[in-house]
Amino acid sequence: TDFRSTMIAKRDRTGRRSQQPGGGTTIISTFDEQLSVEVHHPPSFRAEQLLRIARIGALLNEATD
């Protein structure tokens, strides 16, 4: 199931969309058993966010081995 549109539209209890530190958005979605990651952050935060995503990917790989 592709849940990208759900993640973009989901709001918190106050009606606001959550904001990542650094003023951007990271979207992680699945479609046809493929993981898709979109990172939209300023360069100062992008590298840190990509490292976090790589760690999540490694943990997911360990869990499915």
Image (cartoon, rainbow, N blue to C red):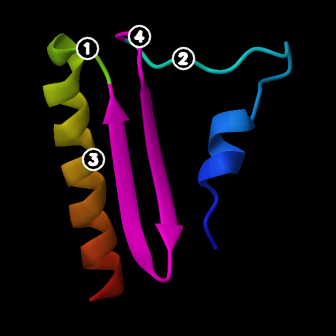
Q: Earlier in the sequence, mark 2 or mark 1?
A: 2
Q: Earlier in the sequence, mark 3 or mark 2?
A: 2
- The residue carrying mark 4 is 23
Q: Which quadrant, please, contains the N terminus?
A: bottom right
Give the alpha-carbon distance from disc 1 to disc 4, as whole Å. Answer: 7 Å
Label annotation for residue 42 = 1
Label annotation for residue 53 = 3
Mark 4 or mark 3: which is in front? 4
- In the rendered structure, the answer to whether residue 42 lies left or right of residue 9 reads left
Q: Mark 4, residues whose alpha carbon is within 10 Å: few (<14), some, or many (≥20)?
A: few
Q: Which residues are magenta?
A: 22-40
Give the alpha-carbon distance from disc 4 to disc 3, as whole Å. Answer: 17 Å
Relative to 59, say whether 63 is above or below.
Answer: below
- The residue carrying mark 2 is 19
Give the alpha-carbon distance from disc 1 to disc 3, as whole Å. Answer: 16 Å
Q: Amino acid at mark 2?
A: Gln
Q: Which quadrant, please, contains the C terminus?
A: bottom left
Q: Amino acid at mark 3?
A: Ile
Q: In terms of secondary structure, where does tag 2 sit?
A: loop
Label annotation for residue 30 = none
